[in-house]
Image (cartoon, rainbow, N blue to C red):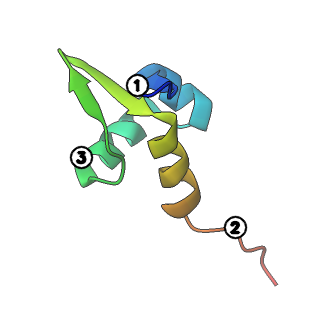
């Protein structure tokens, strides 16, 4: 994939500090695009960064 870094489901969860069940929810909701190779999930770093930075609200401290 043009030299892109590709995550397995486990490495994606570790990199973005989320649980495997949360990843499964986000995949089912269509929030994260992934490819299935055999029975394994692969997610590009580009897609992970898009989801992380664009798909989640910014932290707003309480007043």
In which quarter of the view is residue 22 placed?
top left
Question: Mark 3 or mark 2, which is nearer the start of the sequence?
Answer: 3
Considering only vertical position in the picture, is 49 above or below 19?
below
Q: Are dots 2 and 1 in contact, CB under 8 Å? A: no
Considering only vertical position in the picture, is 22 above or below 63?
above
In-front residue for pair 32/29: 32
Name the mark nearer the viewer: 2 or 1: 1
Tell me the element at label 3. helix
Q: Residue at x 39, y 32 (%)?
A: 43
Q: Position of residue 18 (x, y in %)?
A: 53, 37
Q: Position of residue 58 (x, y in %)?
A: 65, 68
Q: Position of residue 30 (x, y in %)?
A: 27, 53
Q: Which image quarter is the C terminus in?
A: bottom right
Q: Position of residue 24 (x, y in %)?
A: 32, 38
Q: Which mark is residue 28?
A: 3
Q: CA distance from mark 3 to mark 1?
A: 14 Å
Circle 1 sits on which residue? 9
Circle 2 sits on which residue? 59
Q: CA distance from mark 2 to mark 3?
A: 25 Å
Considering only vertical position in the picture, is 4 above or below 53?
above
Dot 2 crowding, Cα within 10 Å, few <14, some 14–19, many 20+: few
Question: Mark 1 or mark 3, which is nearer the start of the sequence?
Answer: 1
């Amino acid at each position: 994939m043009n030299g892109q870094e590709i995550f397995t489901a486990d490495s994606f969860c570790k990199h973005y500090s989320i649980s495997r069940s949360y990843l499964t929810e986000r995949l089912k909701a269509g929030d994260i695009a992934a490819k299935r190779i055999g029975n394994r999930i692969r997610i590009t770093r580009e897609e992970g960064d898009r989801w992380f930075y664009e798909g989640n609200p910014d932290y707003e401290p309480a007043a």
